[in-house]
Structures are given as C-alpha cells and as structure tokens.
Image (cartoon, rainbow, N blue to C red):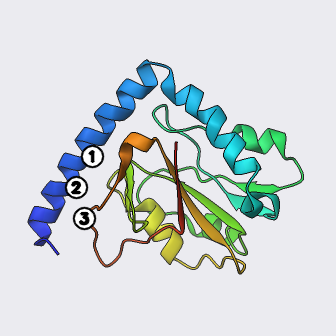
Amino acid sequence: MLPKKSLHNDKASLRLKAKAILENLFKSGELEKRRETAIHKIINADFFISAKKILIYKALKDEIDLNSLVELFPDKKFIIPEVAGNHPPEDFIKQCQDLDLIIIPGLSFDERGYRLGRGGGYYDKLLSNGITPRAPALTLGIIPKELHSETLPNEPHDIKVDLILAI
C-alpha cells in the first residue's frame, strides 16, 4: 500500500481526471444516453426485481441519474440520501435498515469493487455505520465504462461493492 501522503495525492489526481471525463460525457449528452441503458439493465436484473427496499443516490449533474426508478416502481421503497457534509445523519441511518439493494455512485470503481468517491467518505461511513442489509443484499456501483479501472488505491476503511455496472 502507498504511504498515506502519497495515497492522498494519488487519489486527488485520479479524482481530477475522473471529473474531467465526467464533465465531457455530461456536455456531450452521453451521460443521458447511458442513463437509459443503466435503467434498462437494472430493472431487468434479478437483484432489482426481487428487491423491496433500495438505497439509491440523488444524482449530481455528472452522475448517471437513476431517480426515474422511483416513479417507475412505486411498489418498491426507495431511500435517497441528502448528502450534506461527510457524515450520514443518525435518523437517515435508521431508515437504511433491512435494505435489499444499495446502489452507489462513484468517480471510479476498480475490478475488486473498490470505489473512488468525491473525497468525503460519506458512502463508506454510511455502509459501515450500522446499515443492516437483508441477506442476500447487494451493493452495486454504477459508472461510465471509461471510469472502470483495473485497480484503485484503497485504505482499510474503504468499503467494496459487490457488483459494478460500467456502461
């Protein structure tokens, strides 16, 4: 593993590169096209079909937006965090009990399931602070294929996802 200062610099550099790629995909309209592909793949997956309680994210402008799932599937319970700061509020963590599926955004994911986020550690803290998924719950990372890496730097507190959808 890299020394901490080097690791921090490496992650910062990777974040800048990923944000530039995302900005280009956003400006070209490519993210919107991939949103449709992502939703199609997700709604046809067994893990989504069987899920009743799902954590999804409120998409930033440069993330693949899945919020239409809420409207398309009113019979499922969707939990959407309002990310403000680096720590999920206690009352939100309580809402996240017994999840069947957790869909997480990232700037990049690697082959092992490690995620490069925006630097605050919000999702790592959320996943390590008492969320009790139902077995066999699944954590799904979603990113544009250009940001799927072979390996990313990681630290002991980083939480891996089970599956990555790179579109």
Q: Is residue 52 above or below residue 3?
A: above
| Residue displayed at 31% across by 79% down | 156
To which residue does mark 1 refer? Answer: 15
Specify few, some or many for label 3: CA neighbours under 10 Å numbering under 14, 14-19, or 20 or more.
Answer: some
Identify the mark at residue 153; answer none if there is no mark. 3
In this rendering, which labeled residue sits more in front, label 3 or label 2?
3
Distance, label 3 to label 1, CA atoms, is 12 Å
Q: What element carries label 2?
A: helix
To which residue does mark 2 refer? Answer: 11
Kind of residue sitting beneath label 3: Pro
Distance, label 1 to label 2, CA atoms, is 6 Å
Q: Is residue 51 above or below residue 134?
A: above
Q: Is mark 3 on a helix, strand or loop?
A: loop
Q: Can residue 86 be seen in this view?
A: yes
| Residue displayed at 32% across by 55% down | 119
- Disc 3 and disc 2 in contact, CB within 8 angstroms: yes
Left or right of 143? Residue 95 is: right
